Every structure is written in structure tokens, then in C-alpha cells.
Image (cartoon, coloured by chain):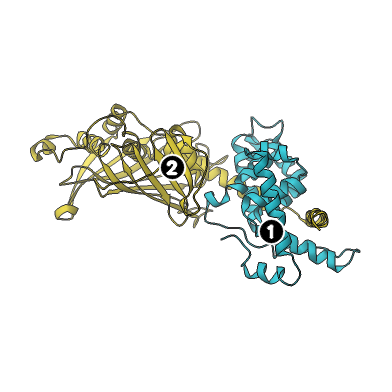
Amino acid sequence: MRRQNFAGLDVFVAERGNALLATAVFLAGSRVAGEDLLQAALERLMRKWQRVRGDPEGYLRRTMYHLAVDQWRVRRRRPEVLTDVDLPARSDGTDDLHLRQALLQALAALPPRQRVVLVLRYWEELSEAEIAATLGCSAGTVKSSASRGLARLRELTAPGRAHEELISGNGAER
Amino acid sequence: MTDQLERQLVAGFQDYAADVRLGPDVLDAATARHHRRTNARRAVVAGGVASGAAALSAVLVLGGTGQPPAAGPPPAATAAAQTPALRLAAAAAATGQTSFRLRLTLTQSYDTGRLKGYRESQDYEGAFDAAADRGYLRLRGTPIEIRIIGERVYTGRPDRDAWRRPMPRSELADVLGAANPATTSVFEQLTIDPPAVLEMLRHLGSVTPAGRSGSGSAAVDKYTFTYQVEADASTATHRVTGEVEIGVRSQLLARISQQTTTVGANPAIADGQPLTWRTVIAFSGYGTPVHVAKPGA
């Protein structure tokens, strides 16, 4: 069926799958949830495949953004803390490495909209206006979500509290 | 501090993304998910759950018709004189003119074949006041609530007073579909016109009285039906079986259950695994007050 009705999908996923999965993981908060998010978005892409073949990645990404924001509505699942992040050793020292790991863990603990806004702003490199247009909200909402998200990240990664709180789940949205 | 935090966040993204690898099973899983959805949709489009959807749509949509609530059960002689199909139609119409609680259970499962063991089920509980044309559905196990008020549908979390922008009633299917594609299928096939409901019930095929069970206010008359859905371009011929229960005293719908199993028209190409589709709609609490407020009001 895939070959017959979804010509080119295999190639698209093979070429862009890793990048899409990375975005999905950031949006969803864990590898498992990210794969699930990507699966859901791919399924929706299949529904529209004949119509969006010109820009499947754009459609897929927009779908993931919206599903990530709406995840509380979709199912009872909640993001898991990104404890499976395994960052490679870098030459710039362990402090930075630990901070980055803590930031990704803290990101997973944010409410969905704040997390999605930060991913769009700092990973997808969209402007606030572009994010507002993408998510269908005002630029003010984007600005406040980003501000609150960064503030929360700063709290959660403050020395002496971040890892324990996050891993125990106390910092995660319930 | 913020600048450094932002830089480190970007670096964290880049570090993680540099090593992440997509497994081959993600696309396979997405494809299987798509097959399940299309298979279920085809079952519905082909008529697999048409009667349940129609009956539910009748009670959800008939509100606002200006008709008064049912005054009470019809004379027994009248009910007895009706054919089973007409009795079903009358019960559906009467149910659509009162208020009630309802529970909707949708189950899809692969009972045989390579995907045997897969099962997915969703439960909605709610209430609807047809006269006031408003009601609600709650997805069990979640804080999600869907409020139907006239021509508007509101979806949100009452516990957080967080609501999405209202949608037109016509998009109720999409709202429910967010929780489950199969639910979308059910509601996309709404038969909202009472004469159409009647016509549909008349065409259920073979409707057979199946006796009475229960006692007192719980006594129901049962009817079974079965009909064949001919093959189309995507779905092989399949047979739908179901049962409708009508309250002996109330003469209102009490329960509708049905089941069908579908495979693709050409299983070697698509939807080769038989998907079994079960739908149960239970009605209760007729006449119960239904309090639904517009969010934010």
C-alpha cells in the first residue's frame, strides 16, 4: 500500500527522518513520546499525501507542532522526563554538558505550549510572528510563553535542584 | 544569564540531534496506524456502524427541533402492532426528544491474524438535553470534556478552565476525531435528519425480535439485525450484526450494540488483517436535568 499510494514517502522519511525525530523528541519530551508523535504526524501526512507532496516536511512539522500543543487533549499520556538523553562528550567541559542535559530534561517538564514555543524559537529558529502564525495564537502569547518557559528552565536548572526534582517528576506538569 | 541559557539550550538541541537516529519501525508503525484508521473508516462508510451513529446523532442532533419531550410511553397495543423496524424508528425518534445520559464505547481489535492482540478502546460518558439542545461528552480516564451547546462545540479541560476556541457543531466529528480517528468515522457519518434516521432504520435489513430480558423498569425488548455490506473499491464484503434494546416501560432506546469485521478489497495490497469493530451506545437517566454552561460565561 505504501508503495502504491505513498510513492516517495519512503525516500522522504529516509532523508529527513532523523531531523524530524529530533524535533519530535524535543516537542514531546522523550524519545518514546517523540516517536509516537512522529508516527501520528506521519499517519496524518499519509491522509493528505497526494495533496501535500510539494511540501511534505512543512505539513508534517506543522502537524507535529499542533499535536504537541494538543497532547493533553489527545490522550492521557504526559511527557516523560528526558532521562534518556545521552549527550556526547564535548571539549568544552563537563559543566556545559551537564547544563545542556539539564536543560533538555527541564524542557520536557514544561507545559506543552511553553515547550513547543521554545522548540520553535530556538531549534526551528522561527520568529515570534512566525510562531504565532503557525500555532494560531497572538504574538503576545508567544512572547509570554517563551518568557515563562525560559524562566522555568532557569529555575529548574539552578544549581543544586534541577536533576533531583526533574528525575523525581516533581518538576513535571501533571 | 538568559543569553547563556538560550545558547546552551540551542547547543543541547544540536548535540542531541546530531546523534538521534530514526528506527525503521516508525514508518511501519505509522503505516499500520493508517491502515487501522482507513479500515475502520471503510467499515463505517460501508455501513458498519451506521445505525449506531444515526441513533446517536438523532439524540445529539434532534435537539432544537422545537418538539416537546415525549409525554410518556405509547399504549402497549400501539407498540405491539408496530413492525420491529417501525418500533426501532419510533424509539429513536422519542429518545431524540428527551434528555438522557449516554455512554459510548468504541473498540477496535485484531482478533486473528498477524496483528492479533491489538485492541484499542475509547469510552465516552455524557448527557444530553435534546429540548435545550445542549450536552456534554467526557473521554473517560482523561480530564477532557466536550460541550455541545446549540451550534457550538467547546473542547477543553474544566479542571483548568482551559478551553479551545469553539467550533461549529458540524465539526463535532473533528473534535472527537482528535481523540480517535475511528470516532471521527462514527460522527462523520451522522444522519441528522429524522426522516433519514427513520429511513435508515427501515433499511436495517432483517430485524428480528429477540425476546425480553430484565424485569421492572430494567425490562427491555431486544431486536437483532444483520445485513451484508457489499464490497466496494476498498473494502471486501462484510456482514454487520447488532442488537437494539428498547425499554419496555419507556419505549426509548436503551442500548445499541453492533459488530463487524472488515478487510481490504484486495488484502494482498492493503488492509489484509481483519479488523473487528464494536460499538456500544447505552442510554439511561431519561429526563435527567443536564446542566451545561458555556465556558467562560
Left or right of B122, for residue B128: left
Q: Is residue A51 visible?
A: yes
Left or right of B270, for residue B9: right
Query: Decide: marks 1, 2 in contact (CB < 8 A)?
Result: no
Spot occupied by residue A171 in the image (x, y as percentages of width and height): 63, 64
Which chain did the image draw in cyan? A
User: Where does label 2 land, which residue?
Assistant: B297
User: Where does label 1 land, which residue?
Assistant: A152
Left or right of B266, for residue B218: left
Q: Residue at x 42, y 41 (%)?
A: B294
Q: Chain of mark 1?
A: A
Left or right of A112, for residue A75: left
Residue B110's disc number: none
Q: Residues within 10 Å of mark 2 (few under 14, many from 20)?
A: few
Which residue occupies the foreground of this view, B150 or A62?
B150
Q: Residues within 10 Å of mark 1 (few under 14, many from 20)?
A: some
Colour used to depict chain B in the structure image: yellow
Spot occupied by residue A86 in the image (x, y as percentages of width and height): 77, 64
Spot occupied by residue B296 in the image (x, y as percentages of width and height): 46, 43
Q: Is residue B24 visible?
A: no
